[in-house]
Every structure is written in C-alpha cells, then in structure tokens.
Image (tube, rainbow, N blue to C red):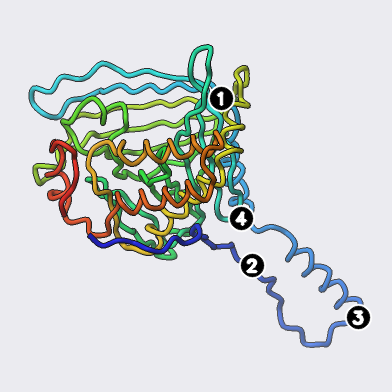
Amino acid sequence: MIRHSSISSRLKFAGLCAVAALATGCATQPASPETASSLQASTTRASASPTSEEQKKEQDRAAILAMAGDYKVSFDFTETVPFVAGYELKEPKLSGGHEVVRVIRNDEDFISLQHILVVGGEQKFPIKHWRQDWIYEPASIPEYVGGNAWQKREFSAAERDGKWAQLVYQVDDGPRYGALAEWTHENGVSSWTSPPNMRPLPRRDATTRDDYDAILATNRHAITPNGWVHEQDNSKLILRNGEPQVLAREVGINTYNKYDDFDVGIADDYWAATAEYWAIVRDAWTALEQDFDAFGLTVQGEPEALYMPLLNLAGEVEEGTLSVAEAGAQAEALIEEYTTTQIGTVKERLAEVGKEDGTASY
C-alpha cells in the first residue's frame, strides 16, 4: 500500500473574471485637454463598472451564501421505478430535524458551508453533518468512481468557464461526490443543476442493504422564499457484475425551511470548540485530493471504522480531555491508515464487499 505523507494546506482555486478593456478609435488630430480629460473620466468609469460576467458571479455567490442559516429540514426519498426483474420497490424514507448551516470560508472563488444537526429529546446534542464546498472555475475536482475511491477529473478552460463545482463531504470531512455546473437565475429562481455523477450509498441504505453499489445522481439546489431545496434524481447502480445496471430509480427532496425555534447555540458552541481540529482533518483530506490522481479507502461499505474515531476525537477536543494538536495528530494517522493511493479496479474493490471486516487487500 502506498502511503501519503504530506499534509498540505487547503486547495485554493483562482479564476477571477477579466475586466474588459475600453476600446478607443484612432484620432486624426491630437485630443484637446478637455477631450483628454473627458476620455480619462469615461475610461475610469468604464473600468470601475462591473462587467456582466462579474455581475453574474456575484449573483452566484449570493445564491450560495443564501444557503447558510438555521433550518427545520426534511429528507424525503421515494423509489419510483424498478429496472431489474423481481425487484420490489422499498418503502419511502422520510426523516427530518433541525440543522444549522454556517459559512466557514468565504473567498472570492471559494465558499465552504458546514452543516451541523441538533438532535435528541430533552438532552439535545450536536452531530457534525455534511459539508459543501463551492469552487469557481476549478481546474480539477475529485470524482467518485465507485468502491470508495475517487479520481481526479480535469477540466479545460472552456469547460469550466463561468461554472461552479460543488464538492460534498461526509461527516468525517472525507469526500463523497462532486460535479461542475452553472448557476442560473431565470424565471425568478436561482438554481444549480449538476450533470449525472456517481456517489457512494447514503447511510440510510448503506447500513440496511447491500443490493447495489453506487448512486448515479442529478442534483439541483434552488433558493426558495423561505430557504432552499435540494432535489435529487437518483439511479441506484449495480457495478459488481461488470456492466453497470440500474436497479431502481428514486426521487429525493431535501427541504430547508428557515426556523430558529431550537437551541441553535448547541451547534455553534460545538463548532467553536472543534473548528481548529476539523481544519486539521480537512487539510489531511485536501493533501490526498491535491497530491494524487486517485485515492480510496481501505474499507468498503459504510466507513464507520474511520468516521467514528474521527468524530470521537472531536468530542474529546470539545470536552477538553484532548488538545487540538494531539487530536489532530491522531486524526492524520487514522486517515493515513484507512486510505490508499493504489485503488485497483472497481471490480477488485467491490469484491471486498461482504467480507467479515470489509478490509480491502489491494
């Protein structure tokens, strides 16, 4: 197994739109001082005025930042059509709760939103949930290729022009999926719709079934008057038999409605106590994304063996029983233990599914 050793800083993406230069015609006579002064003022005004590209980018940024806030959320998933003989559609899965979404980084070309759930009965507690990073005109992204592995996908300048990548990370800040698409602001709605892209099984299925291997999903994020919605068109894929086969289709509606009549401070206090630790964890994953063309996990199925210790370390930091530096060092060691840059083929990776400990041998 090839190990990675360097923990680099988070990947920074640049791609500022160029300001169009003011073109002037040729003059047959030297300009008078008054004309020159007028021309200089006109040029200054034109340079200071935002181009349509810049205005569009600011609209995009405003839509992304609008997803931050306090919410009552619902997660509604319904299988709709079977594509394998004898398969019976499963019962719909509906859940919900309270969630905060916080901006943890806001640069010109990079916005990071951290989700934290607040759950429990009388004794409420926080659960670090997913994270979404938005990157403007990225040169590459890590793309999920099945079997708990990711491969770098590069984009040409034309492919990424004016577009944002959304990268989604799971509870331990490990990658899940990503795609590149354009935000649109038409008919009174700001929305972003991905091309179909693969992603791992959601926990709701990974912990209860083993009859498919990945989801091929089209995701749409749209800003609503009272929050936002994440709509999904999911095809549940069987990959283990060679040629991919759709088992069933599913529609998903995750609704985020603004709501703050819950103890928002539980989430904010957790993040204040653990943010430095999670920054170290993010850097460890970023090193893999940045330094290698491909990487994967050494376990298949639901990677609880990795994410539970990482979450527990955050809990120790929050309680003050472990320093940020100590917890960060242990987290780096865990990520190194459970990752590899020798990913093999998807068939080889999925051959490990169902083994007693799910440990990959490639």
How packed mark 2 is, by other alpha carbons closer than 10 Å (few <14, some 14-19, many 20 or more), is few
Give the residue pinned by disc 2.
Answer: 20
x, y percentage for residue 37? 88, 75
Count of residue discs = 4
Give the residue pinned by disc 1.
Answer: 71
Quarter holding the N terminus? Answer: bottom left
**Which amino acid type corresponds to the residue marked 3 in the rendered image?**
Pro
Earlier-in-chain disc, 1 versus 3: 3
Give the residue pinned by disc 4.
Answer: 108
Q: Nearer the viewer, residue 329 or 103?
A: 329
Q: Is residue 257 above or below residue 5?
A: above
Quarter holding the C terminus? Answer: bottom left
Q: Nearer the viewer, mark 2 or mark 1?
A: 1
Is residue 67 something one can see in this rendering?
A: no
Q: Nearer the viewer, mark 4 or mark 3?
A: 4
Q: Residue at x 59, y 48 (%)?
A: 105
In space, the residues marked 4 and 3 are separated at their CA atoms by 39 Å
x, y percentage for residue 225? 59, 26
Relative to 42, 82 lies left or right: left
Q: Nearer the viewer, mark 2 or mark 3?
A: 2
**Which amino acid type corresponds to the residue marked 4 in the rendered image?**
Glu
Give the residue pinned by disc 3.
Answer: 33
Earlier-in-chain disc, 2 versus 3: 2
x, y percentage for residue 118? 52, 24
Earlier-in-chain disc, 2 versus 4: 2
Q: Nearer the viewer, residue 323 or 221?
A: 323
Answer with the quarter of the image where residue 226 lies.
top right
In space, the residues marked 1 and 3 are separated at their CA atoms by 60 Å
Q: Nearer the viewer, mark 2 or mark 4?
A: 4
Question: Helix or strand or loop: what does disc 1 sit on?
Answer: strand
